[in-house]
Image (cartoon, rainbow, N blue to C red):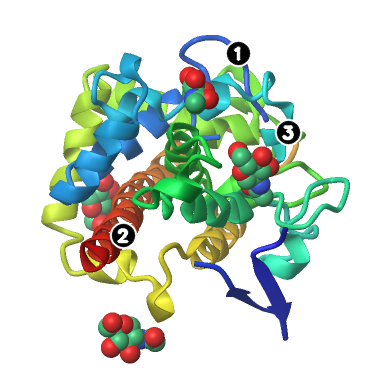
């Protein structure tokens, strides 16, 4: 089943790696995903928060952020889900097109991060619909959606096919040997927490939250808006990501280069803004999913 009809390069939604399995180093790393979901929690409506709490697994203890890396933890166990964390664009093309790019390596359509966001949004839209609800595991749908809205904002999760979104570009992060993808998933955030936030991720999250209410307060509405009343709109997020990948991630990061202060200090603001945007957009998407439905359920009563 395909939920989209590709026409004239546009997408109509017709229905309503790199990764180490070492705890602490898990698309954004564990810390990035935690920050995104923490930020999102602050912007959920009462209705959405209630639905989220019903769907969360027990061990999350009511905290969405606790399960935002679940999709990475099960990635090898649910091997089929591996392609859903990213989308690749043709080499050196700094744009993204759903119909051209959203497929897995076997060419199966919709199997990429944006396709997965549509998929799990559609599943969650059955939350109030007791008959079709049972077709899906909505706990998993919530955990996947929360993770993938984060991933699509990491610039190198929408990177070039040939270098696997920076995974095959070996670089040094200060003295440590790593790859460019990992720098953007984890290292920039880790270094920022150590250098500027007194080794506490919470301090970084709070600084981003302050920026959302101060510096970025005029931008929030445009970040959250979904064109033509769609429930989820991952395509513009992916376009932003590949554009940022070209402008910031790949630039001056050729294979074998050493990335230090200059790269770190100029890219950190990009990372912090992407974390803010994904948090707000995750909340806005969950709010649309659960508010819309409770209205329909209301009307049926
Ligand atoms: C949609 O979700 C189902 C259930 O998790 C999964 O089996 C399927 O592969 C997903 N497809 C896409 C394109 O995300
Ligand atoms: C739904 O998924 C969660 C997480 O994988 C699992 O613990 C739970 O047993 C599943 N529920 C059903 C009804 O299969
Ligand atoms: C979006 O929804 C609003 C209110 O439901 C409606 O007035 C407007 O025409 C819709 N816009 C589009 C582009 O469908
Ligand atoms: C806050 O916003 C300013 C202006 O956009 C930016 O320079 C700074 O890096 C941001 N800080 C954080 C923590 O997001």
Left or right: 65 in relation to 102: left
Left or right: 129 in relation to 172: left
The residue at label 1 has a CB less than 8 Å from ligand 2: no
If the image is split into quadrants, where does the C terminus sit? bottom left
Q: Residues within 10 Å of mark 1 (few under 14, many from 20)?
A: few
Residue 195 pos. (x, y %): 30, 24
Observer-nearest residue: 260 or 14?
Answer: 14
The residue at label 3 has a CB less than 8 Å from ligand 1: yes
The answer to whether residue 44 shows anywhere in this view is: no
Q: Residues within 10 Å of mark 2 (few under 14, many from 20)?
A: some
Q: Residues within 10 Å of mark 3 (few under 14, many from 20)?
A: few
Residue 87 pos. (x, y %): 68, 51
Nearer mark to the viewer, of 1 and 2: 2
The residue singled out by tag 3 in the image is 80
* Mark linked to residue 21: 1
Give whichever of discs 1 and 2 has the lower sequence position. Answer: 1
Q: Residue at x 55, y 19 (%)?
A: 73
* Mark linked to residue 235: none
The residue singled out by tag 2 in the image is 293
Nearer mark to the viewer, of 3 and 2: 2
């Amino acid at each position: 089943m395909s939920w989209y009809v590709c026409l004239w390069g546009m997408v109509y939604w017709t229905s309503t790696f790199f990764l180490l399995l070492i705890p602490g180093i898990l698309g954004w790393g564990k810390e990035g995903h935690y920050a995104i979901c923490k930020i999102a929690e602050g912007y959920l409506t009462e209705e959405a928060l209630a639905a989220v709490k019903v769907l969360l697994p027990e061990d999350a203890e009511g905290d969405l952020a606790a399960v935002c890396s679940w999709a990475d933890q099960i990635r090898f166990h649910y091997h089929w889900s591996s392609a859903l964390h990213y989308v690749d664009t043709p080499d050196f093309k700094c744009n993204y097109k759903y119909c051209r790019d959203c497929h897995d390596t076997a060419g199966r359509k919709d199997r990429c991060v944006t396709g997965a966001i549509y998929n799990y949004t559609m599943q969650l839209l059955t939350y109030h619909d007791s008959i079709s609800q049972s077709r899906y595991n909505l706990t998993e749908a919530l955990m996947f959606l929360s993770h993938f809205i984060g991933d699509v904002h990491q610039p190198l999760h929408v990177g070039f096919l040939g270098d696997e979104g920076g995974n095959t570009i070996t670089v040094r992060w200060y003295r440590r040997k790593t790859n460019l993808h990992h720098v953007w998933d984890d290292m920039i955030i880790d270094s920022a927490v150590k250098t500027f936030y007194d080794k506490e991720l919470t301090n970084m999250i709070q600084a981003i939250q302050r920026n959302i209410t101060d510096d970025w307060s005029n931008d929030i509405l445009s970040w959250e808006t979904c064109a033509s009343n769609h429930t989820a709109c991952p395509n513009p997020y992916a376009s932003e990501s590949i554009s940022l990948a070209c402008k910031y991630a790949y630039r001056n990061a050729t294979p074998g280069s050493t990335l230090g202060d200059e790269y770190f200090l100029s890219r950190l603001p990009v990372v912090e803004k992407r974390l803010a945007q994904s948090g707000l957009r995750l909340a806005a998407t969950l709010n649309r999913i659960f508010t819309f439905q409770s209205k329909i359920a209301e009307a049926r009563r």
